[in-house]
């Protein structure tokens, strides 16, 4: 029962909301004034007598004076930035569509936020749509040129964009794989000084561990000669003065020959 009562209470509210939405009024405008403003803007941008760069280089006072002059001639207000963007957009459209030839009748569409005026235009290379957007105070906010492309041209552009996007992704992936593969050498680069220090320490410890060669006490040659001479003299029964030992040679074998 409570649910039914709440639903009944909501029905008038919804009706009021729908009625309010239905009573939203569109912006009132004069087609002749809007058409005159659009024609004037077309003549300015198509004439090529002034460029967006020239207006950007003007002082704020000169820009304001120029906009006031245009408003006096046409009766439509606009900011200097709108005129600059329109001139730059028109120059860019010439690269896509070619030279401007003519346009068809204007089509108007208004709502509570403003008025949008469109017209189909003929250019030397391809057709395009020119759109003028006015706000609720009928001030010109933008002028754009949209070129018409065939289905094959759209698909070609989409394919090129896809190819460029995928190619960029694959190049970045390959580069990332290369960087990752090189990471295994990073610890070796940082550990080189430590390895050199450890190798030097190992060499020093090995050198200190090697035992010094034992030097055998060598007999003095003079003493050895005296002993040998005395032994030979005793064996021969003669004095040691009768012979002279000139050299001593050691035999390879320690065994005495019989």
Image (cartoon, rainbow, N blue to C red):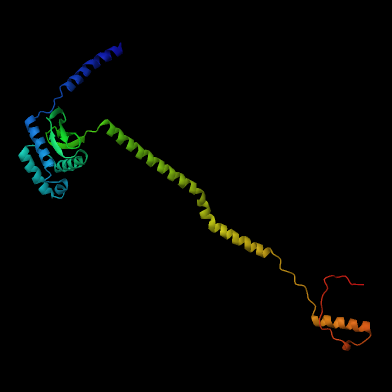
Q: Nearer the viewer, residue 72 or 106?
A: 106
Rendered residue at 18%/22% (across/down): 21
Evaluate whether residue 77 shows in this view.
no
Which image quarter holds the C terminus? bottom right
Q: Nearer the viewer, residue 226 or 2?
A: 226
Rendered location of residue 28, percent (x, y): 10, 28
x and y, in percent, of residue 215 in the image: 75, 72
Q: Quick one: which residue is furthest to the right in this view?
A: 237
Q: Residue at x 5, y 40 (%)?
A: 73
Q: Is residue 15 above or below residue 36?
A: above
Extreme top residue here?
A: 1
Q: Position of residue 45 (x, y in %)?
A: 13, 41
For image coordinates 9% across by 45% down, the residue present is 66
Residue 4 in view here? yes
Residue 32: image location, x then y, percent: 6, 31
Q: Residue furthest front?
A: 124
Seen in the picture, residue 215 relative to 44 is either above or below; the reply is below
Quadrant in which residue 124 is drawn? top left
Count of numbered circles in the view: 0
Q: Is residue 254 left or right of residue 168?
A: right
Give the quarter of the figure containing the N terminus.
top left
In the picture shown, does residue 250 fall above or below 33?
below
């Amino acid at each position: 029962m409570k649910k039914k009562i709440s639903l009944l209470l909501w029905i008038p509210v919804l009706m009021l909301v729908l009625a309010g939405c239905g009573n939203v009024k569109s912006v009132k405008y004069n087609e002749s004034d809007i058409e005159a403003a659009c024609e004037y803007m077309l003549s300015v941008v198509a004439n090529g007598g002034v460029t967006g760069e020239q207006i950007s280089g003007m002082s704020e006072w000169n820009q304001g004076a120029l906009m006031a002059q245009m408003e006096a001639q046409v009766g439509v207000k606009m900011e200097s930035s709108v005129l600059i963007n329109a001139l730059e957009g028109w120059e860019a459209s010439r690269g896509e569509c070619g030279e401007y030839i003519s346009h068809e009748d204007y089509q108007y569409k208004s709502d509570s936020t403003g008025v949008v005026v469109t017209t189909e235009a003929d250019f030397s290379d391809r057709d395009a749509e020119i759109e003028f957007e006015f706000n609720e105070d009928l001030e010109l906010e933008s002028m754009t040129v949209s070129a018409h492309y065939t289905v094959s041209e759209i698909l070609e552009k989409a394919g090129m964009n896809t190819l460029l996007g995928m190619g960029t992704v694959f190049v970045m992936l390959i580069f990332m794989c290369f960087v990752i593969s090189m990471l295994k050498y990073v610890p070796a680069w940082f550990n080189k000084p430590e390895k050199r220090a450890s190798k030097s320490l190992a060499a020093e410890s090995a050198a200190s561990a090697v035992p010094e060669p034992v030097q055998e006490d060598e007999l003095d040659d003079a003493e050895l000669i005296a002993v040998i001479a005395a032994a030979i003299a005793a064996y021969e029964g003669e004095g040691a003065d009768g012979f002279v030992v000139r050299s001593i040679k050691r035999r390879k074998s320690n065994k005495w020959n019989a």
